[in-house]
Image (cartoon, rainbow, N blue to C red):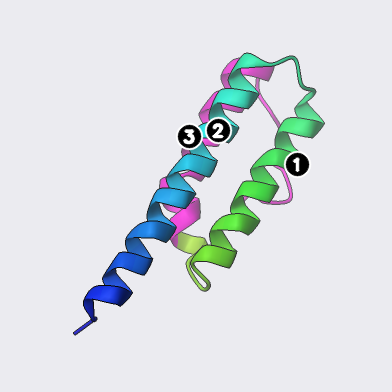
Amino acid sequence: MPTPDELAEEERRVRQLRLVVALALNTIGQTDMSLEDARDMVAAVRQTALCLFPDKAFAFDLIYLPRFRRLLAARYGTAPAAPWSVN
C-alpha cells in the first residue's frame, strides 16, 4: 500500500502532466505554429510524460495521443503519421 507521501507525489506528477498537455493543446490550437513545430511539441510532451511516468508510454498513447491527433487533423488537415505515432 502506498504511503501518503507517495500518493501526494503521484498526484503532483499527474497535475504537472495535465498542465503540460493543456498548455500544448492550447498553444497548438491558438498560435500560427507550423505543423512540424506542432509535431515537435507533441513529441516533447510525450517525452515529459515518460519522464514523469516511466514505462507508461502505452497509457500516454491511449489517453493523450488521440487528443493531439484530432487537434492536428482539425488544425492542419489530415496529418501523416509522426515519429511519436504508435501506428
Based on the displayed image, in which of its 4 quarters is residue 9 positioned? bottom left
Badge 3 is on which residue? 67
Across and down, in percent, residue 10 comes to 36, 66
Q: Amino acid at mark 2?
A: Leu
Sequence-wise, the earlier of marks 1 and 2 is 2
User: CA separation, marks 1 and 3?
Assistant: 15 Å
The label shown at residue 40 is 1
Assign a secondary structure to mark 2: helix
In the picture, the quarter occupied by the N terminus is bottom left
First reached walking from the N terminus: tag 2 or tag 3: 2
Judge the density around disc 3: few (<14), some (14-19), many (≥20) Cα neighbours within 10 Å. some
What's drawn in magenta, residue-wise?
A: 59-87
Q: Is residue 43 magenta?
A: no
At which x and y percent is residue 57? 52, 63
Which element carries disc 3, helix, strand or loop? helix
Q: Residue drawn at (39%, 58%), measured in percent from left and top?
A: 12
| 10 Å crowding of disc 1: few (<14), some (14-19), many (20+) | some
Q: Is residue 83 magenta?
A: yes
Element at badge 1?
Answer: helix
Q: Verify CB contact (< 8 Å) between mark 2 and mark 3.
A: no
